[in-house]
Image (cartoon, rainbow, N blue to C red):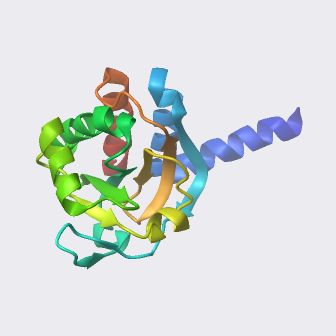
Amino acid sequence: MKNTCAALLYTGLVMLANPALADLSEAEAMREGDMKKLTFHAAPQAAGSSEFMTFEGDALTLAEYEGKWVLLNFWATWCAPCRKEIPMLSELQREFGGERFEVVTIASGRNPPPAMQSFFEEIGVDNLPLHRDPKSALAREMGVLGLPITVILNPEGQEVARMRGDADWASDNARAVLATILNGEAG
């Protein structure tokens, strides 16, 4: 019992010393519905460093996004759940996007650029990037098995949470979880 109390006290003190960890814990605790699938890591994990491409073919890495929170979504043109989910991610970008947060979408595997463009046009998305990972190098490095996969990266470029499968990102709970993460970072 004494050890349990000491462990709880130590955990509380660590969280107070690092507000970002405390806020991630708060975001984790408030998950409901589809957001229960969002798994927060006990400690930030290294994100992939492999290059991916812009729609035009220019090389990028996730390091380009350091300094802001990133909701990174791996998708494909053949992915039916992606068709439903990406418009919700587009709305998150409209609501939260800016200097502190960005939704980044990467089509993993063989996704011809014209098909990617048609996919986004058909679902009415015009504010998310059409990035490509044609050989799935980044996806493999990050352990992406199946699609969609959504990863949350902290401003240091580390993975702090991951969701396998699609979710209702338009839900009040999804927005509240994300707002808690973003507001905690500012504090």
Q: Nearer the viewer, residue 110 or 168?
A: 110
Q: Is residue 164 left or right of residue 175?
A: right
Q: Is residue 7 left or right of residue 170?
A: right
- Measured along the vertical axis of the image, is residue 38 above or below residue 160? above
Counting labels gives 0
For the point 87% across and 36% down, which residue is it? 2
Q: Nearer the viewer, residue 138 or 65?
A: 138
Q: Quadrant of the N terminus?
A: top right
Is residue 126 visible to us here?
yes
- Measured along the vertical axis of the image, is residue 126 above or below residue 134? above
For the point 18% across and 37% down, which residue is it? 123
For the point 37% across and 61% down, which residue is it? 110
> In the image, residue 66 lies at what x, y percent?
33, 68
The image quadrant that residue 11 belongs to is top right
> In the image, residue 6 lies at what x, y percent?
78, 42
> In the image, residue 8 lies at what x, y percent?
72, 38
Is residue 32 visible to us here?
no
Q: Is residue 79 left or right of residue 98?
A: right
For the point 30% across and 49% down, which residue is it? 186
> In the image, residue 154 lies at what x, y percent?
41, 57
- Measured along the vertical axis of the image, is residue 160 above or below residue 175? below
